[in-house]
């Protein structure tokens, strides 16, 4: 439920994408604005949470990879510092409907380069 995700907070959730279980990070940017990304650092393919559902944030609000220190802004998921600077988290399209966060297309990731 949307009310379980406070504004400016990150949460982890498990979903099925392309028929496979996937960990997502949800970020509530505003009242009805939620962003979602795969819970994977583009640098080494590791999860971004240091413990299940626990994420590091810098003093300025950046998401920080606990393994290699990559820092991501939460507007577009772009890496602004660290070993994968210039890369971005893989976005997953979600929307808010009737107080719930739902996948736009539960069968596909947004912006993939895969064939």
Image (cartoon, rainbow, N blue to C red):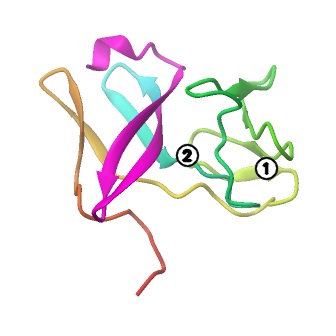
Q: Quadrant of residue 13?
A: top left
- Locate the C terminus and report the quarter of the image it occupies: bottom left
Rendered position, 84 above or below 6: below
Q: List x then y, in percent, for residue 1.
A: 26, 19
Which residue does the image show at 61% across and 52% down from the upper left? 40
Which numbered mark, 1 or 2, is in the foreground of this view?
A: 2
Which residue does the image show at 40% across and 17% down from the upper left? 5
Is-magenta flag for residue 95? no
Q: List x then y, in percent, for residue 111.
A: 43, 68
Rendered position, 10 above or below 4: below
Which residue does the image show at 79% across and 36% down from the upper left? 66
Q: List x then y, in percent, for residue 61.
A: 71, 25
Q: Secondary structure at mark 2?
A: loop
In this rendering, position of residue 42 left or right of residue 33: right
Q: Earlier in the sequence, mark 1 or mark 2?
A: 2
How many numbered callouts?
2
Q: Secondary structure at mark 1?
A: strand
Rendered position, 16 above or below 50: below
Dot 1 crowding, Cα within 10 Å, few <14, some 14–19, many 20+: some
Do labels 1 and 2 touch, CB within 8 Å?
A: no
Please name whichever residue, 17 or 62, is drawn nearer the observer in this view of the structure.
17
Q: CA distance from mark 1 to mark 2?
A: 17 Å
Q: Which residues are magenta?
A: 1-26
Q: Which residue is mark 2?
A: 39
In this rendering, position of residue 12 left or right of residue 50: left
In this rendering, position of residue 73 left or right of residue 18: right
Q: Which label is found at residue 80? A: 1
Q: List x then y, in percent, for residue 44.
A: 75, 60
Which residue does the image show at 56% across and 41% down from the upper left? 75
């Amino acid at each position: 439920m949307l009310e379980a995700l406070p504004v400016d907070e990150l949460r982890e959730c498990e979903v099925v994408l392309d028929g496979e279980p996937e960990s997502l990070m949800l970020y509530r940017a505003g009242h009805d604005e939620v962003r979602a990304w795969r819970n994977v650092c583009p640098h080494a393919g590791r999860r971004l949470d240091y413990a299940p559902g626990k994420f590091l944030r810098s003093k300025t609000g950046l998401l920080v990879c606990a393994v290699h220190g990559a820092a991501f802004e939460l507007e577009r998921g772009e890496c602004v510092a660290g070993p994968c600077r210039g890369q971005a988290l893989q976005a997953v399209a979600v929307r808010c409907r009737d107080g719930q966060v739902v996948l736009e297309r539960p069968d596909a990731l947004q912006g993939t380069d895969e064939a």
